[in-house]
Image (tube, grey):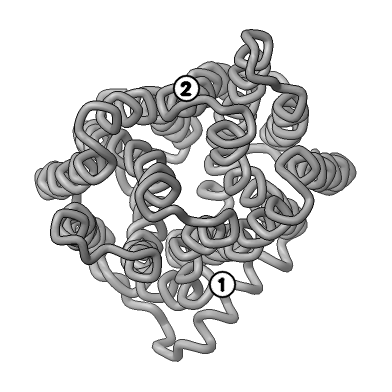
Amino acid sequence: MAHSGFVRFWAADTVSLVGTYVTALALAVLAEKQLHSSNAEFGALNAARWVPYLLFGLIAGVLVDRYRRRPILIGADFARAGLLGLIPLLTVTGLLTMPILIGIVAVFGTLSLVYDAAHQSFLPQLVPAALLTEANARLEQTNSVAQGAGPALAGWLIKVAGAPVAILVDAVSYFFSGLMLRKIQVPERSPQPESRHLGREIREGLAWVYTHRVLAPLAISSHAWFLFNGMVMTVLPFFVLRGLGFDEFVLGLTMAAAGAGGAAGASLSGRAVRRLGAGRAIIAGRWLTPVGYGLIPFATNATTGLVLLFAGQFVFGMSIGLDGPAEMGYRQTVTPDRLQGRMNATMRSINRGMIVFGAPLGGILGDHLGHRATLWIAIAGLAGQAIAISFSQVRTARLVS
């Protein structure tokens, strides 16, 4: 794909994504090892990043549709770099506590909300519609490689230098991402919406998503997926570290297996869309999530347990790699440019908002029912959303040229 703007966009994404996955593991270790958080507190930390999506997501979509998207991306990257740099500074000075960490993560989530809405809406300006699925597949493959390399790098960094240094690496990655985005030269006019009425613009975005015969069931099933996946992602680090007694490096390798699976899934996504259609490719990906997670509760602290953890995460990663490019390609091609920001922000903000409920729920259930029981509850919910989407209009979805 020889579009120079996309190549720079892709490079910026790669740099920041590696750092993001480093921080995901580093925050878990920082909370569990240094701040001695409970399952419920860690659930609150996980939820804090996504609360802004629930509170401000629809507003962010309107703003992204009103203004040029590249400056939004650059500003959000530089601001996130500075914010993450506060965490190692507060750790060194002994001022970091769980409430402060949760607050920093909440502000970080607000910046990421704006970035994400602009990021998904900017891509159609860099490549033609016919190449959107391929472009999304490239981004998903990069995401998967970062998901593999990031946790492995984080596990090593944490062992050698500690979690705060690992988070500092992420801060630097956002800074370099912003610099690369500044080099993209693409004609981008300031949008001129017919209406400047915030409430009317929000309602227009909601109506587009929730009255569309395919986008509506796709959105609702995605909300359920994020709710139950939020439960799993809260419980899983504690299950591996406390329940099975493995160390941070093993936890990093477990997450890296999901990255390898994601790369495999993304490499198959385009072929699956061509042979099955976008809708059936999405449905296949949705089924792989409960299948992969269904292996994890059977894990023990023996070698076979490690194999089950890695296999479960690999299949989970494959589900995202297969589903993601097909879903994004469909959403971007059926949505007019003037609604891209609101469509993306509506779906993404409510999806992430579901983590606000799922992450604390996973932590509370983990404290009271145990890790394995909580995992099984979440797996049952993920199977339920897969059944629902299989019988919806999503199965008829085809990409629009």
Question: Where the C terminus falls, by quadrant?
Answer: top right
Q: Secondary structure at mark 1?
A: helix
Residue on which the image places disc 2: 250
Question: Where the N terminus falls, by quadrant?
Answer: top left
Foreground: 83 or 386? 83
Residue 191 image position (x, y, % from top left):
31, 71
Q: In percent of the image, x 33 and y 43: which residue is there?
A: 23
Residue 91, can we see it? yes
Q: Answer with left or right where residue 381 lies relative to residue 266.
A: right
Q: In percent of the image, x 18 and y 45: which residue is there?
A: 168
Q: Distance between the Cα atoms at labels 2 and 1?
A: 43 Å
- Near mark 2 (Cα within 10 A), the count class, few <14, some 14-19 or many ≥20, is some
Specify the quadrant of the image occupied by residue 261: top right
- Near mark 1 (Cα within 10 A), the count class, few <14, some 14-19 or many ≥20, is many
Foreground: 103 or 204? 103
Q: Answer with left or right where residue 317 lies relative to residue 96.
A: right
The answer to whether the residue labelled 2 contacts the one labelled 1, judged by CB atoms less than 8 Å apart, is no
Residue 362 image position (x, y, % from top left):
67, 54
Sequence-first disc among 2 and 1:
1
Residue 122 image position (x, y, % from top left):
34, 52
Q: Answer with left or right where residue 47 lies relative to residue 114.
A: right
Query: As shown in the figure, which amino acid type bears the numbered disc 1?
Result: Gly
Foreground: 365 or 3? 365
Residue 389, can we see it? no
Residue on which the image places disc 1: 205
Relative to 130, say whether 59 is above or below.
below
Q: In percent of the image, x 33 and y 69: which residue is there?
A: 100
Specify the quadrant of the image occupied by residue 25: top left
Relative to 303, say whether 293 is above or below.
below
Relative to 366, say whether 51 is above or below.
below
Q: Secondary structure at mark 2?
A: helix
